[in-house]
Image: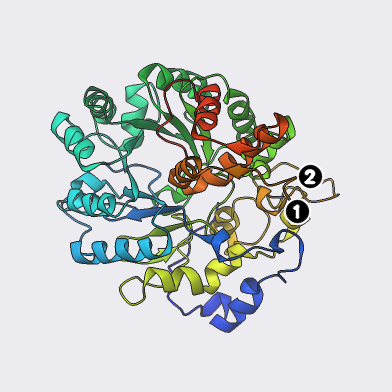
């Protein structure tokens, strides 16, 4: 993969020409009367996942770090202050208080005020999770996170071989400390998920890691597919064939681990493979599940430690800085974000019948040669032509089904990114079974059929 580019702060000079040229080349929205864009409103572009990279400080030095995080004694000179973080969270609430906030770093627990920041977010009604290496989670920290109301933690494990994990993470004892953090979370009722970064050195371990995570009691196993940027710029990625192999395996895993969701991240092809296996798969955008595919700039954004708002961590394309402009203004008015919302995809991604439910990874062509709308060369699929597979919110429903007051309230409390999928599924069941009014009892019955008696905590 090629080199990453500097953050754009309103001036796109040099190789890419003037800002206006960049607008013309990449940002021009498609006519809203065309295809998937027909009928979409600003509500379809609410953020439902915002990653807050609030520090570059870290107690590890991982080979693949996109942030190139530094030691815990450094990296904080230009970080957003506590007050600026609180103001940012208030501004995100103005756009969508129902979204999920991922507080991460670096290592977020190194930042002294991080619990105060999390406490403020929870009080505003956000679902809050921490993305952490787990090494600093002891019983006291786990209990505090539970008391604050943090939804859970995502802890990275890159191999079941401690030596391999520690070598990759750059610190002896990292694996042992991460597992100790998982055990402390379990003891204190703090839900956890496992993050696994698929690389040449470990991708063949995935079946064993999934089984291990399930036995541990993880709510989610997220498999991240690297984009070689930041400190990971010189790493070798898995090949496109290996990429396809791993994604196919993950699709087949979906129903095998009761109580644990298995998901691919930064791998929108996952949606195409799931649809190929089952057009009615509940994990595709064709059925209303908006938590997959490439979400960059449409329903997801990242804030850097010094306040730049970008479409994703792998693309330092800044829409602006939250110190100078409000999150709402940057989210709603950014030409960069609009280029993801109404994309003119190029090459085979533009021709592909799965472009609306997949769309390819935008970071890979960006990191490779600076054009985030170009085709994703890590996808082996050859478009076959024909009608585009539609996203569920653009597919007319057969008939409206009534929801009583209690069920409507429960639906409103379901995470924003799951709501369309749940609504569609419940209404489909009601129509097929001649049920005129949806009740809480019906929703609970269907939940138990899907997830068992224990409701999943992590639903993204």
Asked if one can make out residue 371 in the rendered structure from this viewpoint, the answer is no
Do the residues bearing badges 1 and 2 touch, measured as CB atoms within 8 Å?
yes
Asked if one can make out residue 15 in the rendered structure from this viewpoint, the answer is yes
- Point out residue 89 in the picture as x, y percentages from the top left corner: 31, 61
Q: Residue at x 19, y 56 (%)?
A: 74
Instruction: First in sequence, mark 1 or 2: give its number.
Output: 1
In the structure shown, which secondary structural element does the residue marked by tag 2 occupy? loop
Q: How is the image coloured?
A: rainbow
Mark 2 nearby-residue class (10 Å; few <14, some 14–19, many ≥20): few
Q: Which mark is residue 382?
A: 2
Q: Residue at x 55, y 22 (%)?
A: 449
Find residue 21 and report its image quarter. Answer: bottom right
In the depicted view, which residue is nearer to us: 331 or 2? 331
> Label 1 to label 2, Cα distance in Å?
7 Å
- Point out residue 292 in the picture as x, y percentages from the top left corner: 56, 44
Vertical relation: 6 (above or below) 441: below
- Point out residue 269 in the picture as x, y percentages from the top left corner: 64, 42
In the depicted view, which residue is nearer to us: 35 or 26? 35
- Point out residue 246 in the picture as x, y percentages from the top left corner: 59, 30
In the depicted view, which residue is nearer to us: 156 or 81? 81
Q: Residue at x 62, y 24 (%)?
A: 252
In the structure shown, which secondary structural element does the residue marked by tag 1 occupy? helix
Q: Which mark is residue 376?
A: none
Mark 1 nearby-residue class (10 Å; few <14, some 14–19, many ≥20): some
Vertical relation: 428 (above or below) 5: above
Residue that mark 1 sits on: 348
Q: Is residue 89 left or right of residue 296?
A: left
Marker count (numbered): 2
Q: Residue at x 41, y 22 (%)?
A: 213
């Amino acid at each position: 993969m090629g080199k990453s580019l500097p953050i754009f702060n309103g001036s796109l000079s040099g190789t890419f020409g003037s800002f206006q040229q960049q607008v013309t080349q990449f940002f021009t929205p498609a006519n809203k009367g065309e295809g998937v864009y027909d009928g979409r409103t600003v509500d379809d572009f609410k953020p439902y996942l915002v990653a807050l990279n609030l520090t570059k400080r870290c107690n590890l030095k991982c080979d693949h770090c996109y942030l190139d995080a530094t030691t815990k004694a450094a990296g904080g000179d230009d970080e957003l202050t506590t007050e600026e973080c609180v103001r940012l969270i208030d501004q995100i609430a103005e756009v969508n208080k129902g979204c999920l906030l991922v507080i991460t770093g670096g290592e977020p627990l190194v930042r002294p005020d991080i619990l105060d920041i999390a406490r403020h977010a929870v009080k505003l009604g956000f679902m809050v999770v921490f993305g952490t290496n787990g090494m600093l989670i002891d019983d006291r920290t786990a209990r505090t996170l539970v008391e604050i109301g943090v939804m859970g933690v995502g802890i990275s494990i890159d191999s079941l071989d401690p030596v391999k994990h520690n070598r990759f993470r750059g610190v002896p004892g990292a694996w042992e400390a991460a597992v100790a953090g998982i055990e402390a979370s379990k003891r204190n009722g703090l839900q956890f998920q496992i993050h696994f970064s698929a690389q040449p050195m470990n991708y063949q371990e995935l079946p064993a890691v999934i089984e291990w995570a399930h036995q541990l009691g993880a709510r989610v196993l997220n498999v991240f597919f690297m984009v070689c940027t930041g400190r990971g710029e010189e790493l070798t990625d898995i090949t496109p064939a290996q990429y396809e192999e791993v994604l196919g395996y993950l699709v087949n895993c979906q129903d095998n681990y009761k109580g644990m969701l298995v998901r691919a991240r930064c791998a929108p092809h996952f949606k195409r493979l799931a649809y190929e296996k089952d057009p009615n798969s509940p994990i595709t955008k064709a059925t209303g599940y908006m938590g997959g595919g490439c979400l960059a700039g449409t329903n997801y954004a990242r804030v850097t430690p010094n306040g730049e708002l970008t479409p994703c961590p792998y693309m330092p394309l800044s829409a602006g800085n939250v110190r100078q402009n409000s999150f709402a203004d940057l989210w709603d008015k950014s030409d960069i974000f609009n280029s993801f919302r109404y994309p003119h995809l190029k090459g085979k991604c533009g021709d592909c019948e799965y472009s609306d439910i997949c769309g390819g990874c935008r970071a890979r062509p960006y990191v490779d040669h600076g054009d985030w709308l170009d085709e994703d060369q890590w996808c082996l699929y050859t478009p076959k032509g024909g009608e585009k597979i539609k996203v569920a919110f653009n597919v007319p429903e057969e008939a409206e089904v009534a929801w009583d007051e209690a069920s409507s309230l429960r639906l409103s409390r379901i995470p924003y990114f799951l709501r369309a999928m749940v609504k569609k599924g419940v209404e489909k069941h009601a129509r097929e079974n001649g049920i005129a009014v949806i009740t809480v009892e019906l929703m609970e019955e269907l939940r138990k059929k899907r997830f068992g008696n224990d409701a999943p905590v992590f639903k993204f």
